[in-house]
Amino acid sequence: MIRGDDFLQNVTIIITHGFEMRIIMMHMFGWSEDYFESLEHPDRCEVKKIILTKDHVFKLESQMRKFNPYTNTKYILRKKK
C-alpha cells in the first residue's frame, strides 16, 4: 500500500501553455520536428498524463491530436481573408 507521502514524492505537476507542453513532450519522447509540427496545440486547460512504466520509459496515456487545417476554424477564416 502506498502512503500519501510516498505517492506525492513520485508525482510531478507541470502547468504550462500548449506550445511549451509540446516542446517538453518532444524532448521526452524524441519526436521529430515534422511530427511535432503535425500536432495540434492542446485545448485550454487540457490535461495530459505521462507515466513512467516499469521499464523506466515515459508513456503518454492519451494521444495528441493531429493538426487538420480543414477542420480548424481559425485556419479557414485566415484563408478566406
Image (cartoon, helix red, strand yellow):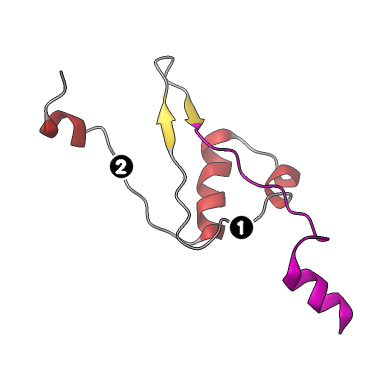
Q: Answer left or right for 42 relative to 2.
A: right
Stretch in magenta: 60-81
**Number of disc labels:** 2
Image position of 51 with respect to 80: above or below: above
Seen from the viewer's position, the closer of residues 22 and 7 is 7
Helix, strand or loop at mark 2:
loop
Give the residue drawn at x 53%, y 43%.
Answer: 25
The residue pinned by badge 1 equals: 41
Vertical side of 31 occupied by 42: above or below: below
- Answer with the quarter of the image where residue 49 lies: top left
39 within the magenta span: no
Which residue is denoted by mark 2 in the rendering? 12
User: In the rendering, at what x and y percent does residue 65 appear?
Assistant: 66, 47
Amino acid of disc 1: His
Spatial distance from mark 2 to mark 1, Cα to Cα? 21 Å
Residue kind at label 2, given as amino acid type: Thr
Q: Nearer the viewer, mark 2 or mark 1?
A: 1
Residue at image coords 64%, 38%: 31
Contact between marks 2 and 1 (CB within 8 A): the answer is no
